[in-house]
Protein backbone atom coordinates (compact mmCIF):
# COMPACT_ATOMS: atom_id res chain seq x y z
CA UNK A 1 0.00 0.00 0.00
CA UNK A 2 1.22 3.51 -0.74
CA UNK A 3 2.47 5.49 2.24
CA UNK A 4 4.00 2.45 3.95
CA UNK A 5 7.22 0.47 3.79
CA UNK A 6 5.43 -2.85 4.33
CA UNK A 7 8.31 -3.93 6.59
CA UNK A 8 8.69 -4.79 10.29
CA UNK A 9 12.04 -5.17 12.04
CA UNK A 10 12.20 -7.47 15.08
CA UNK A 11 15.37 -7.30 17.19
CA UNK A 12 16.23 -9.96 19.78
CA UNK A 13 18.60 -8.40 22.29
CA UNK A 14 19.21 -11.70 24.07
CA UNK A 15 20.71 -13.29 20.94
CA UNK A 16 21.97 -10.18 19.09
CA UNK A 17 20.09 -10.97 15.92
CA UNK A 18 17.18 -9.58 13.93
CA UNK A 19 14.51 -10.49 11.41
CA UNK A 20 12.92 -8.34 8.71
CA UNK A 21 9.33 -9.31 7.94
CA UNK A 22 7.07 -8.24 5.12
CA UNK A 23 3.85 -6.57 6.18
CA UNK A 24 0.65 -7.23 4.25
CA UNK A 25 -1.62 -4.54 2.85
CA UNK A 26 -4.49 -6.38 4.51
CA UNK A 27 -3.18 -5.57 7.98
CA UNK A 28 -2.42 -1.97 7.07
CA UNK A 29 -5.85 -1.34 5.55
CA UNK A 30 -7.41 -2.69 8.74
CA UNK A 31 -5.44 -0.63 11.25
CA UNK A 32 -3.20 1.76 9.26
CA UNK A 33 0.25 2.40 10.74
CA UNK A 34 1.53 3.99 13.94
CA UNK A 35 -0.73 3.22 16.88
CA UNK A 36 -3.02 0.91 14.94
CA UNK A 37 -0.24 -1.34 13.69
CA UNK A 38 1.70 -1.30 16.97
CA UNK A 39 -1.39 -2.15 19.03
CA UNK A 40 -2.19 -5.09 16.76
CA UNK A 41 1.40 -6.32 17.08
CA UNK A 42 1.40 -5.90 20.86
CA UNK A 43 -1.80 -7.90 21.23
CA UNK A 44 -0.61 -10.61 18.83
CA UNK A 45 2.92 -11.00 20.14
CA UNK A 46 3.21 -9.92 23.77
CA UNK A 47 2.73 -12.90 26.13
CA UNK A 48 -0.46 -12.46 28.22
CA UNK A 49 0.33 -11.47 31.79
CA UNK A 50 3.98 -10.73 31.02
CA UNK A 51 5.99 -8.85 33.65
CA UNK A 52 6.63 -5.40 32.10
CA UNK A 53 10.32 -5.65 33.03
CA UNK A 54 10.68 -9.18 31.70
CA UNK A 55 12.81 -9.74 28.58
CA UNK A 56 9.62 -11.10 26.99
CA UNK A 57 7.83 -7.73 27.11
CA UNK A 58 7.87 -6.22 23.63
CA UNK A 59 8.87 -2.58 23.12
CA UNK A 60 7.60 -1.26 19.79
CA UNK A 61 8.62 1.91 17.94
CA UNK A 62 6.37 3.03 15.11
CA UNK A 63 5.95 5.93 12.75
CA UNK A 64 3.01 6.55 10.45
CA UNK A 65 2.44 7.44 6.79
CA UNK A 66 2.61 11.19 7.47
CA UNK A 67 6.09 10.97 9.01
CA UNK A 68 9.19 11.94 7.04
CA UNK A 69 7.31 13.51 4.16
CA UNK A 70 5.68 16.71 2.98
CA UNK A 71 2.63 16.83 5.23
CA UNK A 72 2.57 19.26 8.15
CA UNK A 73 2.49 17.98 11.72
CA UNK A 74 3.68 14.47 10.92
CA UNK A 75 7.04 14.66 12.70
CA UNK A 76 6.22 12.21 15.51
CA UNK A 77 7.07 8.69 16.59
CA UNK A 78 5.23 6.42 19.03
CA UNK A 79 6.42 3.84 21.57
CA UNK A 80 4.13 1.00 22.66
CA UNK A 81 4.52 -1.66 25.37
CA UNK A 82 3.09 -2.96 28.62
CA UNK A 83 3.65 -0.27 31.23
CA UNK A 84 5.71 -0.98 34.36
CA UNK A 85 3.90 1.93 36.03
CA UNK A 86 0.33 0.73 35.44
CA UNK A 87 0.59 -2.88 34.29
CA UNK A 88 -1.61 -2.03 31.30
CA UNK A 89 -1.34 -1.01 27.66
CA UNK A 90 0.69 2.07 27.04
CA UNK A 91 1.54 4.46 24.25
CA UNK A 92 3.88 7.45 24.39
CA UNK A 93 4.82 9.89 21.62
CA UNK A 94 7.60 12.34 20.88
CA UNK A 95 8.47 14.91 18.25
CA UNK A 96 11.59 16.85 17.30
CA UNK A 97 13.88 15.93 14.40
CA UNK A 98 14.49 12.32 15.38
CA UNK A 99 11.16 10.96 14.01
CA UNK A 100 12.40 11.65 10.47
CA UNK A 101 15.62 9.73 11.21
CA UNK A 102 13.57 6.80 12.56
CA UNK A 103 11.45 6.87 9.43
CA UNK A 104 14.47 6.96 7.11
CA UNK A 105 15.44 3.46 8.28
CA UNK A 106 12.47 2.21 6.29
CA UNK A 107 10.31 0.22 8.71
CA UNK A 108 6.67 0.71 9.71
CA UNK A 109 7.41 -0.80 13.12
CA UNK A 110 10.50 -1.84 15.05
CA UNK A 111 10.05 -4.46 17.77
CA UNK A 112 12.56 -4.93 20.59
CA UNK A 113 12.44 -8.12 22.63
CA UNK A 114 14.83 -9.92 24.98
CA UNK A 115 17.56 -8.45 27.18
CA UNK A 116 21.19 -7.73 26.33
CA UNK A 117 23.84 -9.30 28.53
CA UNK A 118 25.53 -5.92 29.01
CA UNK A 119 24.70 -2.24 28.37
CA UNK A 120 24.09 -1.98 24.65
CA UNK A 121 23.48 0.58 21.92
CA UNK A 122 22.02 -0.09 18.50
CA UNK A 123 22.29 1.47 15.07
CA UNK A 124 19.14 0.76 13.07
CA UNK A 125 19.33 1.26 9.29
CA UNK A 126 17.52 -0.10 6.20
CA UNK A 127 19.61 -3.29 6.12
CA UNK A 128 18.93 -4.12 9.78
CA UNK A 129 20.84 -3.53 13.01
CA UNK A 130 24.38 -3.06 14.32
CA UNK A 131 25.00 -3.91 18.00
CA UNK A 132 27.47 -1.88 20.10
CA UNK A 133 28.97 -2.16 23.58
CA UNK A 134 27.66 0.83 25.58
CA UNK A 135 29.08 0.02 29.02
CA UNK A 136 30.91 3.35 29.23
CA UNK A 137 27.68 5.24 28.41
CA UNK A 138 25.84 3.58 31.30
CA UNK A 139 25.32 6.19 34.01
CA UNK A 140 25.39 9.17 31.65
CA UNK A 141 22.62 11.74 31.78
CA UNK A 142 20.47 12.00 28.67
CA UNK A 143 22.09 15.03 27.01
CA UNK A 144 25.61 13.57 27.17
CA UNK A 145 24.42 10.09 26.20
CA UNK A 146 22.62 11.36 23.10
CA UNK A 147 25.64 13.36 21.94
CA UNK A 148 28.01 10.46 22.53
CA UNK A 149 25.73 7.95 20.79
CA UNK A 150 25.50 10.13 17.68
CA UNK A 151 29.27 10.66 17.64
CA UNK A 152 30.10 6.98 18.02
CA UNK A 153 27.33 4.99 16.37
CA UNK A 154 26.27 7.03 13.32
CA UNK A 155 27.01 5.64 9.86
CA UNK A 156 28.96 7.26 7.04
CA UNK A 157 27.16 5.86 4.04
CA UNK A 158 26.39 7.54 0.76
CA UNK A 159 22.83 8.81 0.56
CA UNK A 160 22.11 8.36 4.27
CA UNK A 161 20.42 11.35 5.83
CA UNK A 162 21.14 12.96 9.19
CA UNK A 163 21.04 10.43 12.05
CA UNK A 164 18.90 10.72 15.16
CA UNK A 165 19.22 9.07 18.57
CA UNK A 166 16.93 8.07 21.42
CA UNK A 167 18.43 7.47 24.85
CA UNK A 168 17.60 6.94 28.52
CA UNK A 169 19.12 8.55 31.59
CA UNK A 170 20.19 7.13 34.96
CA UNK A 171 16.56 6.78 36.08
CA UNK A 172 15.82 4.38 33.22
CA UNK A 173 18.89 2.34 34.07
CA UNK A 174 17.75 2.06 37.69
CA UNK A 175 14.26 1.06 36.54
CA UNK A 176 12.40 4.03 37.98
CA UNK A 177 8.89 3.17 36.82
CA UNK A 178 8.24 6.50 35.11
CA UNK A 179 11.48 6.85 33.14
CA UNK A 180 11.39 8.54 29.74
CA UNK A 181 12.94 7.92 26.33
CA UNK A 182 14.63 11.18 25.30
CA UNK A 183 15.58 12.63 21.92
CA UNK A 184 16.72 15.98 20.53
CA UNK A 185 17.79 16.82 24.12
CA UNK A 186 14.43 18.17 25.27
CA UNK A 187 11.89 15.98 23.48
CA UNK A 188 10.71 12.75 25.01
CA UNK A 189 8.30 9.86 24.98
CA UNK A 190 7.51 10.77 28.53
CA UNK A 191 4.64 8.97 30.20
CA UNK A 192 4.03 5.53 31.71
CA UNK A 193 7.62 4.28 31.91
CA UNK A 194 8.57 3.41 28.33
CA UNK A 195 12.13 4.40 29.29
CA UNK A 196 12.00 1.87 32.12
CA UNK A 197 11.25 -0.96 29.68
CA UNK A 198 14.07 0.36 27.49
CA UNK A 199 16.44 0.19 30.46
CA UNK A 200 15.21 -3.24 31.53
CA UNK A 201 16.55 -4.56 28.22
CA UNK A 202 20.02 -3.15 29.00
CA UNK A 203 19.58 -0.62 26.21
CA UNK A 204 21.16 2.80 26.58
CA UNK A 205 20.75 4.29 23.11
CA UNK A 206 19.47 3.67 19.59
CA UNK A 207 20.74 5.61 16.59
CA UNK A 208 18.49 5.62 13.51
CA UNK A 209 19.71 6.43 10.02
CA UNK A 210 18.88 5.64 6.43
CA UNK A 211 17.92 6.74 2.96
CA UNK A 212 14.36 5.44 2.69
CA UNK A 213 11.34 7.61 1.94
CA UNK A 214 7.67 6.73 1.75
CA UNK A 215 6.10 6.62 -1.70
CA UNK A 216 2.79 8.45 -2.02
CA UNK A 217 -0.15 7.47 -4.20
CA UNK A 218 -0.17 11.01 -5.61
CA UNK A 219 3.21 12.66 -5.11
CA UNK A 220 2.27 15.87 -6.90
CA UNK A 221 -1.08 16.01 -5.13
CA UNK A 222 0.55 15.72 -1.71
CA UNK A 223 3.00 18.52 -2.54
CA UNK A 224 0.15 20.79 -3.69
CA UNK A 225 -1.94 19.88 -0.65
CA UNK A 226 0.92 20.67 1.77
CA UNK A 227 1.55 24.02 0.09
CA UNK A 228 -2.12 25.00 0.20
CA UNK A 229 -2.44 23.75 3.80
CA UNK A 230 0.33 26.00 5.10
CA UNK A 231 -0.95 28.97 3.12
CA UNK A 232 -4.45 28.52 4.59
CA UNK A 233 -3.46 27.87 8.21
CA UNK A 234 -0.16 29.64 8.86
CA UNK A 235 -1.97 32.72 10.20
CA UNK A 236 -4.70 30.82 12.02
CA UNK A 237 -5.28 32.53 15.43
CA UNK A 238 -4.62 29.30 17.30
CA UNK A 239 -1.42 28.67 15.36
CA UNK A 240 -0.22 32.20 16.02
CA UNK A 241 -1.00 31.85 19.73
CA UNK A 242 1.03 28.65 20.03
CA UNK A 243 3.89 30.20 18.06
CA UNK A 244 3.87 33.24 20.34
CA UNK A 245 3.43 31.59 23.74
CA UNK A 246 3.59 27.82 23.34
CA UNK A 247 1.70 25.80 25.91
CA UNK A 248 2.60 28.33 28.62
CA UNK A 249 -0.51 30.23 27.50
CA UNK A 250 -2.59 27.50 29.18
CA UNK A 251 -1.55 28.65 32.68
CA UNK A 252 -3.65 31.81 32.44
CA UNK A 253 -6.54 30.10 30.69
CA UNK A 254 -6.80 27.29 33.21
CA UNK A 255 -6.46 29.49 36.30
CA UNK A 256 -9.09 31.88 34.97
CA UNK A 257 -11.37 28.91 34.35
CA UNK A 258 -10.73 27.55 37.86
CA UNK A 259 -9.48 24.25 36.44
CA UNK A 260 -5.76 24.54 37.28
CA UNK A 261 -5.00 21.80 39.84
CA UNK A 262 -3.03 23.33 42.70
CA UNK A 263 -1.79 22.39 46.16
CA UNK A 264 -2.07 18.71 45.27
CA UNK A 265 -5.64 18.81 44.00
CA UNK A 266 -7.01 20.97 46.84
CA UNK A 267 -7.50 24.05 44.66
CA UNK A 268 -8.55 24.96 41.12
CA UNK A 269 -6.20 27.93 40.89
CA UNK A 270 -3.27 29.47 42.74
CA UNK A 271 -2.60 33.07 43.69
CA UNK A 272 0.88 33.06 42.17
CA UNK A 273 -0.25 31.90 38.73
CA UNK A 274 0.82 35.08 36.95
CA UNK A 275 4.39 34.53 38.19
CA UNK A 276 4.46 31.11 36.51
CA UNK A 277 2.39 32.09 33.47
CA UNK A 278 3.47 32.54 29.89
CA UNK A 279 3.44 36.33 29.85
CA UNK A 280 5.92 36.70 32.71
CA UNK A 281 8.10 33.87 31.39
CA UNK A 282 8.47 35.54 28.00
CA UNK A 283 9.01 39.00 29.45
CA UNK A 284 11.65 37.95 31.98
CA UNK A 285 13.72 35.51 29.90
CA UNK A 286 15.14 35.06 26.41
CA UNK A 287 12.54 32.85 24.72
CA UNK A 288 12.36 31.83 21.06
CA UNK A 289 9.81 29.63 19.27
CA UNK A 290 11.19 26.21 18.34
CA UNK A 291 9.58 23.73 15.97
CA UNK A 292 9.68 20.01 15.29
CA UNK A 293 10.30 18.82 11.74
CA UNK A 294 7.50 19.73 9.29
CA UNK A 295 5.80 22.12 11.70
CA UNK A 296 4.83 25.78 11.30
CA UNK A 297 3.34 26.00 14.80
CA UNK A 298 6.68 26.12 16.66
CA UNK A 299 5.15 25.63 20.11
CA UNK A 300 8.51 24.77 21.72
CA UNK A 301 10.11 27.43 23.92
CA UNK A 302 13.88 27.58 23.41
CA UNK A 303 14.83 29.52 26.52
CA UNK A 304 17.77 31.11 28.30
CA UNK A 305 16.94 31.95 31.93
CA UNK A 306 17.83 35.58 32.64
CA UNK A 307 17.68 35.84 36.43
CA UNK A 308 18.00 34.02 39.73
CA UNK A 309 20.36 31.26 40.79
CA UNK A 310 19.72 29.36 37.54
CA UNK A 311 20.67 32.33 35.36
CA UNK A 312 21.96 31.30 31.90
CA UNK A 313 20.32 27.86 32.09
CA UNK A 314 19.27 26.89 28.55
CA UNK A 315 16.44 24.53 27.82
CA UNK A 316 13.39 23.94 25.67
CA UNK A 317 10.40 24.45 27.91
CA UNK A 318 8.87 24.15 30.34
CA UNK A 319 5.58 22.99 28.86
CA UNK A 320 2.25 23.68 30.54
CA UNK A 321 2.11 20.24 32.17
CA UNK A 322 5.46 20.74 33.90
CA UNK A 323 4.37 24.17 35.12
CA UNK A 324 1.14 22.67 36.46
CA UNK A 325 2.87 19.78 38.23
CA UNK A 326 5.61 21.75 39.96
CA UNK A 327 4.19 25.29 39.96
CA UNK A 328 0.63 24.21 40.75
CA UNK A 329 0.59 20.92 42.65
CA UNK A 330 3.82 21.70 44.51
CA UNK A 331 3.07 25.44 44.76
CA UNK A 332 6.53 26.58 43.61
CA UNK A 333 6.22 30.28 42.83
CA UNK A 334 9.48 31.00 40.95
CA UNK A 335 9.36 30.14 37.26
CA UNK A 336 13.13 29.77 37.05
CA UNK A 337 12.85 27.01 39.68
CA UNK A 338 10.19 25.25 37.61
CA UNK A 339 12.49 25.54 34.59
CA UNK A 340 15.38 24.04 36.57
CA UNK A 341 13.19 21.12 37.69
CA UNK A 342 12.20 20.60 34.04
CA UNK A 343 15.89 20.47 33.12
CA UNK A 344 16.73 18.14 36.02
CA UNK A 345 13.98 15.68 35.10
CA UNK A 346 15.09 15.73 31.45
CA UNK A 347 18.71 15.03 32.37
CA UNK A 348 18.03 12.13 34.75
CA UNK A 349 15.23 10.93 32.47
CA UNK A 350 11.90 10.99 34.33
CA UNK A 351 8.39 12.18 33.51
CA UNK A 352 7.66 15.64 34.94
CA UNK A 353 3.91 15.06 35.33
CA UNK A 354 4.32 11.94 37.45
CA UNK A 355 7.28 13.42 39.32
CA UNK A 356 5.37 16.58 40.26
CA UNK A 357 2.31 14.61 41.30
CA UNK A 358 4.36 12.32 43.53
CA UNK A 359 6.16 15.24 45.17
CA UNK A 360 2.77 16.88 45.71
CA UNK A 361 1.38 13.72 47.31
CA UNK A 362 4.30 13.60 49.76
CA UNK A 363 3.77 17.30 50.54
CA UNK A 364 0.08 16.79 51.21
CA UNK A 365 0.79 13.74 53.37
CA UNK A 366 3.32 15.77 55.34
CA UNK A 367 0.88 18.70 55.70
CA UNK A 368 -1.72 16.34 57.15
CA UNK A 369 0.79 14.77 59.53
CA UNK A 370 0.61 11.39 57.84
CA UNK A 371 4.06 11.26 56.21
CA UNK A 372 7.24 11.96 58.16
CA UNK A 373 9.49 13.60 55.59
CA UNK A 374 10.97 17.09 55.47
CA UNK A 375 9.16 18.70 52.55
CA UNK A 376 6.81 21.68 52.39
CA UNK A 377 4.64 23.24 49.69
CA UNK A 378 6.59 25.81 47.71
CA UNK A 379 10.09 24.70 48.73
CA UNK A 380 12.01 24.16 45.47
CA UNK A 381 15.19 22.92 47.16
CA UNK A 382 13.32 20.11 48.88
CA UNK A 383 11.66 19.10 45.58
CA UNK A 384 15.04 19.10 43.81
CA UNK A 385 16.49 16.88 46.53
CA UNK A 386 13.55 14.48 46.32
CA UNK A 387 13.78 14.24 42.51
CA UNK A 388 17.48 13.38 42.84
CA UNK A 389 16.66 10.67 45.39
CA UNK A 390 13.96 9.22 43.13
CA UNK A 391 16.28 9.09 40.11
CA UNK A 392 18.98 7.39 42.19
CA UNK A 393 16.53 5.11 44.06
CA UNK A 394 18.05 6.46 47.25
CA UNK A 395 16.18 6.15 50.56
CA UNK A 396 12.60 7.41 50.26
CA UNK A 397 13.27 7.81 46.54
CA UNK A 398 13.45 4.04 46.19
CA UNK A 399 9.84 3.81 47.38
CA UNK A 400 8.51 6.69 45.28
CA UNK A 401 10.33 5.41 42.16
CA UNK A 402 7.82 2.56 41.93
CA UNK A 403 4.93 4.97 41.26
CA UNK A 404 1.85 6.34 42.93
CA UNK A 405 0.08 3.10 43.87
CA UNK A 406 3.04 1.54 45.76
CA UNK A 407 3.95 4.93 47.26
CA UNK A 408 0.45 5.65 48.57
CA UNK A 409 0.16 2.10 49.93
CA UNK A 410 3.52 2.32 51.69
CA UNK A 411 2.59 5.55 53.48
CA UNK A 412 -1.08 4.63 54.03
CA UNK A 413 -2.39 7.60 52.01
CA UNK A 414 -4.33 5.78 49.28
CA UNK A 415 -7.28 8.08 50.01
CA UNK A 416 -5.18 11.13 49.05
CA UNK A 417 -3.62 9.75 45.87
CA UNK A 418 -5.03 11.04 42.57
CA UNK A 419 -4.62 8.61 39.67
CA UNK A 420 -6.49 6.32 37.28
CA UNK A 421 -4.97 2.90 36.59
CA UNK A 422 -1.78 4.08 38.30
CA UNK A 423 -1.24 7.13 36.08
CA UNK A 424 -1.74 10.65 37.43
CA UNK A 425 -3.88 13.17 35.51
CA UNK A 426 -2.51 16.10 33.58
CA UNK A 427 -3.38 19.68 34.50
CA UNK A 428 -7.14 19.78 33.85
CA UNK A 429 -9.36 19.48 36.91
CA UNK A 430 -12.34 17.21 36.13
CA UNK A 431 -14.42 18.83 38.87
CA UNK A 432 -14.53 21.89 36.64
CA UNK A 433 -14.15 20.25 33.21
CA UNK A 434 -16.38 17.21 33.61
CA UNK A 435 -15.58 15.82 30.17
CA UNK A 436 -11.97 15.51 31.26
CA UNK A 437 -13.17 13.23 34.04
CA UNK A 438 -14.61 10.91 31.39
CA UNK A 439 -11.37 11.20 29.42
CA UNK A 440 -9.24 10.28 32.43
CA UNK A 441 -11.47 7.31 33.21
CA UNK A 442 -11.65 5.81 29.73
CA UNK A 443 -8.08 6.36 28.52
CA UNK A 444 -6.42 2.95 28.10
CA UNK A 445 -3.09 4.10 29.56
CA UNK A 446 -4.56 5.78 32.65
CA UNK A 447 -5.53 9.38 33.42
CA UNK A 448 -4.33 10.76 30.09
CA UNK A 449 -5.47 14.08 28.60
CA UNK A 450 -4.09 13.46 25.11
CA UNK A 451 -6.40 10.69 23.99
CA UNK A 452 -9.17 13.25 23.48
CA UNK A 453 -7.79 16.71 24.45
CA UNK A 454 -11.40 17.33 25.46
CA UNK A 455 -10.45 20.40 27.47
CA UNK A 456 -10.51 22.23 24.12
CA UNK A 457 -14.27 22.07 23.42
CA UNK A 458 -15.08 22.62 27.10
CA UNK A 459 -12.88 25.70 27.45
CA UNK A 460 -14.10 27.02 24.09
CA UNK A 461 -17.71 26.71 25.22
CA UNK A 462 -18.71 24.31 22.46
CA UNK A 463 -20.30 22.24 25.22
CA UNK A 464 -20.76 23.60 28.76
CA UNK A 465 -18.03 22.27 31.10
CA UNK A 466 -20.61 21.41 33.78
CA UNK A 467 -22.91 19.52 31.37
CA UNK A 468 -22.88 15.72 31.44
CA UNK A 469 -25.54 14.95 28.81
CA UNK A 470 -24.05 14.74 25.34
CA UNK A 471 -20.49 14.72 26.66
CA UNK A 472 -19.80 11.12 25.68
CA UNK A 473 -21.03 11.57 22.11
CA UNK A 474 -18.84 14.61 21.44
CA UNK A 475 -15.89 13.04 23.26
CA UNK A 476 -16.09 9.90 21.11
CA UNK A 477 -15.90 12.00 17.96
CA UNK A 478 -12.73 13.65 19.29
CA UNK A 479 -11.30 10.32 20.45
CA UNK A 480 -11.95 8.63 17.11
CA UNK A 481 -10.33 11.41 15.11
CA UNK A 482 -7.31 11.54 17.41
CA UNK A 483 -6.93 7.76 17.22
CA UNK A 484 -6.52 8.30 13.48
CA UNK A 485 -3.99 11.05 14.25
CA UNK A 486 -1.96 8.45 16.17
CA UNK A 487 -2.03 5.99 13.27
CA UNK A 488 -0.53 8.75 11.13
CA UNK A 489 1.73 9.90 14.02
CA UNK A 490 0.26 13.36 13.61
CA UNK A 491 0.73 16.08 16.25
CA UNK A 492 -2.19 16.87 18.57
CA UNK A 493 -1.85 20.62 18.06
CA UNK A 494 -3.04 20.19 14.47
CA UNK A 495 -6.41 18.92 15.73
CA UNK A 496 -8.27 22.09 14.64
CA UNK A 497 -6.67 22.00 11.19
CA UNK A 498 -7.05 18.33 10.21
CA UNK A 499 -10.82 17.96 10.38
CA UNK A 500 -12.46 14.74 9.25
CA UNK A 501 -12.76 16.24 5.78
CA UNK A 502 -9.06 17.16 5.67
CA UNK A 503 -8.11 13.69 6.85
CA UNK A 504 -10.14 12.20 4.03
CA UNK A 505 -8.26 14.31 1.47
CA UNK A 506 -4.77 13.89 2.86
CA UNK A 507 -4.93 10.16 3.60
CA UNK A 508 -6.36 9.47 0.17
CA UNK A 509 -3.48 11.36 -1.47
CA UNK A 510 -0.91 9.47 0.60
CA UNK A 511 -2.29 5.92 0.57
CA UNK A 512 -4.58 5.75 -2.43
CA UNK A 513 -7.41 4.48 -0.23
CA UNK A 514 -10.91 5.66 -0.99
CA UNK A 515 -10.93 7.38 2.37
CA UNK A 516 -14.19 8.22 4.11
CA UNK A 517 -15.06 9.42 7.58
CA UNK A 518 -17.10 6.27 8.16
CA UNK A 519 -14.11 4.08 7.30
CA UNK A 520 -11.84 6.01 9.66
CA UNK A 521 -14.35 5.77 12.49
CA UNK A 522 -14.48 2.02 11.99
CA UNK A 523 -10.67 1.82 12.12
CA UNK A 524 -10.56 4.04 15.22
CA UNK A 525 -13.18 1.93 16.98
CA UNK A 526 -11.31 -1.24 16.04
CA UNK A 527 -8.08 0.14 17.53
CA UNK A 528 -9.87 1.18 20.71
CA UNK A 529 -11.41 -2.29 21.02
CA UNK A 530 -7.91 -3.76 20.64
CA UNK A 531 -6.54 -1.62 23.47
CA UNK A 532 -9.49 -2.57 25.67
CA UNK A 533 -9.02 -6.24 24.88
CA UNK A 534 -5.35 -5.96 25.78
CA UNK A 535 -6.12 -4.32 29.11
CA UNK A 536 -8.80 -6.88 29.95
CA UNK A 537 -6.27 -9.61 29.18
CA UNK A 538 -3.87 -7.94 31.64
CA UNK A 539 -6.43 -7.83 34.45
CA UNK A 540 -8.39 -4.59 33.98
CA UNK A 541 -11.40 -4.38 36.32
CA UNK A 542 -14.53 -2.20 35.91
CA UNK A 543 -13.42 0.02 38.81
CA UNK A 544 -10.20 0.84 36.94
CA UNK A 545 -12.20 3.11 34.61
CA UNK A 546 -13.43 5.17 37.57
CA UNK A 547 -11.89 8.25 39.18
CA UNK A 548 -10.44 8.25 42.71
CA UNK A 549 -13.08 8.88 45.36
CA UNK A 550 -11.30 11.99 46.60
CA UNK A 551 -12.14 13.82 43.37
CA UNK A 552 -15.84 13.11 43.99
CA UNK A 553 -15.79 13.99 47.70
CA UNK A 554 -13.53 17.04 47.60
CA UNK A 555 -15.33 20.12 46.28
CA UNK A 556 -13.13 22.89 44.91
CA UNK A 557 -13.09 26.13 46.96
CA UNK A 558 -15.20 27.93 44.35
CA UNK A 559 -17.83 25.17 44.51
CA UNK A 560 -17.07 23.04 41.43
CA UNK A 561 -17.59 19.30 41.84
CA UNK A 562 -17.99 16.05 39.94
CA UNK A 563 -20.16 13.51 41.72
CA UNK A 564 -19.78 9.76 41.39
CA UNK A 565 -23.27 9.62 39.85
CA UNK A 566 -22.33 12.18 37.21
CA UNK A 567 -19.21 10.24 36.32
CA UNK A 568 -21.18 6.99 36.13
CA UNK A 569 -23.77 8.59 33.85
CA UNK A 570 -21.10 9.73 31.40
CA UNK A 571 -19.27 6.42 31.60
CA UNK A 572 -22.36 4.32 30.89
CA UNK A 573 -23.32 6.66 28.06
CA UNK A 574 -19.82 6.22 26.63
CA UNK A 575 -19.94 2.42 26.93
CA UNK A 576 -23.34 2.25 25.25
CA UNK A 577 -22.27 4.45 22.35
CA UNK A 578 -19.16 2.32 21.93
CA UNK A 579 -21.26 -0.82 21.87
CA UNK A 580 -19.70 -2.13 25.08
CA UNK A 581 -21.52 -3.66 28.05
CA UNK A 582 -22.00 -1.96 31.44
CA UNK A 583 -18.58 -3.16 32.61
CA UNK A 584 -16.91 -1.61 29.57
CA UNK A 585 -16.30 -4.89 27.74
CA UNK A 586 -16.60 -4.86 23.93
CA UNK A 587 -18.55 -7.68 22.26
CA UNK A 588 -16.36 -10.62 21.31
CA UNK A 589 -17.03 -10.18 17.60
CA UNK A 590 -15.62 -6.63 17.80
CA UNK A 591 -12.21 -7.98 18.79
Image (cartoon, helix red, strand yellow):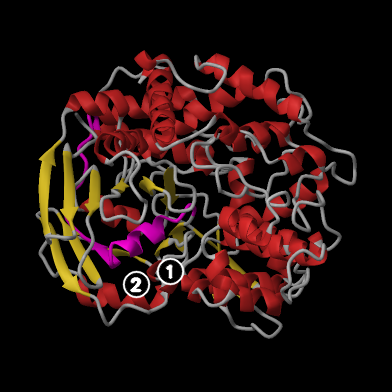
Quick one: label 1, few (<14), some, or many (20+) residues within 10 Å? many
Residue reaching furthest right?
A: 558
**Which dot marks residue 146?**
2
Q: Quadrant of the N terminus?
A: top left
Quick one: label 2, few (<14), some, or many (20+) residues within 10 Å? many
Residue drawn 74% across the image and 25% down it: 566
- Whole-angstrom CA distance, mark 1 to mark 2, is 7 Å
Q: Residue 41 lies in what quarter of the image?
A: top left
Magenta-span inclusion, residue 110: no
Q: Residue 160 lies in what quarter of the image?
A: bottom left
Residue drawn 48% across the image and 33% down it: 482
The stretch of residues the image draws in magenta is 191-218
Left or right position of 488 against 272: left
To which residue does mark 1 refer? 185
SS assignment at label 1 = loop
Residue 501 locus on image (x, y percent): 46, 22
Residue drawn 77% across the image and 55% down it: 262
SS assignment at label 2 = helix
Amino acid sequence: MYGFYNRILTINLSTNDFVVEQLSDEILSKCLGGKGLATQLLLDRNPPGVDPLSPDNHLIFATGPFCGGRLWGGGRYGVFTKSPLTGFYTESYSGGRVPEAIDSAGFDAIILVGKASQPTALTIHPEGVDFHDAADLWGMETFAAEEEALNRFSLDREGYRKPGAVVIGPAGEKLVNFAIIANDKWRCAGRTGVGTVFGSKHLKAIVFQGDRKREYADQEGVAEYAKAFSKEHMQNPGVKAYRKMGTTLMVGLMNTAGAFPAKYWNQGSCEHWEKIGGEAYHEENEVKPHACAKCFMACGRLTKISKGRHKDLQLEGPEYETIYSFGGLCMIEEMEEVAYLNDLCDRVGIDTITAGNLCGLIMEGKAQGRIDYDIEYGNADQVIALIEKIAARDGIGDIIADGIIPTSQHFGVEDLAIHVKGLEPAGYDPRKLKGMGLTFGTSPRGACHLRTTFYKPELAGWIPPEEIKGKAEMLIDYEDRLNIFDTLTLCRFYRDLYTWEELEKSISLVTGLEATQEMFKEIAAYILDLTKKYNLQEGLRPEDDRLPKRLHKKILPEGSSLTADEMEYMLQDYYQLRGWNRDGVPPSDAM
